[in-house]
Image: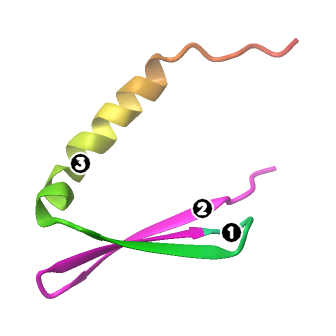
Amino acid sequence: METLLYTAELIQEGDTYTLVVQDLVRDTVQTTPVPKTAVDRLPVFLSALTAKLNSVPSRGRW
């Protein structure tokens, strides 16, 4: 069974970007401004994160 823990949205209003993260377990929302340079690098960051997570050996069940 899957349980959704967090949602994240990157919102653009004109030249301003805001990251909105909702914690569905604690029922909280956090927002933070994001510079355009970070928005532009997001695909590279996500690729690097995916590569790193895929290189971690998975744990076997006992």
Q: Which mark is residue 43?
A: 3
Can you tell which quarter of the image residue 7 is in? bottom right
| Residue that badge 1 annotates | 24
| Residue that badge 2 annotates | 6
Among the two numbered marks 3 and 2 on one chain, the one whose residue lies closer to the N terminus: 2
| Part of the protein shown in magenta | 1-22
Main secondary structure along the magenta-highlighted residues: strand
Of the two numbered discs 3 and 2 in the rendering, the one whose residue sits closer to the viewer:
2
Residue at 82%, 16% in the rendered image: 61
Is the residue under label 3 in contact with that under label 1 (CB below 8 Å)? no
Real-space Cα distance between discs 1 and 3? Answer: 25 Å
Give the answer, above or below, for where 45 lies relative to 3: above
Residue at 23%, 48% in the rendered image: 43
Residue at 29%, 37% in the rendered image: 47
The quadrant in which the C terminus is found is top right
Can you tell which quarter of the image residue 45 is in? top left
Is the residue under label 2 in contact with that under label 1 (CB below 8 Å)? yes
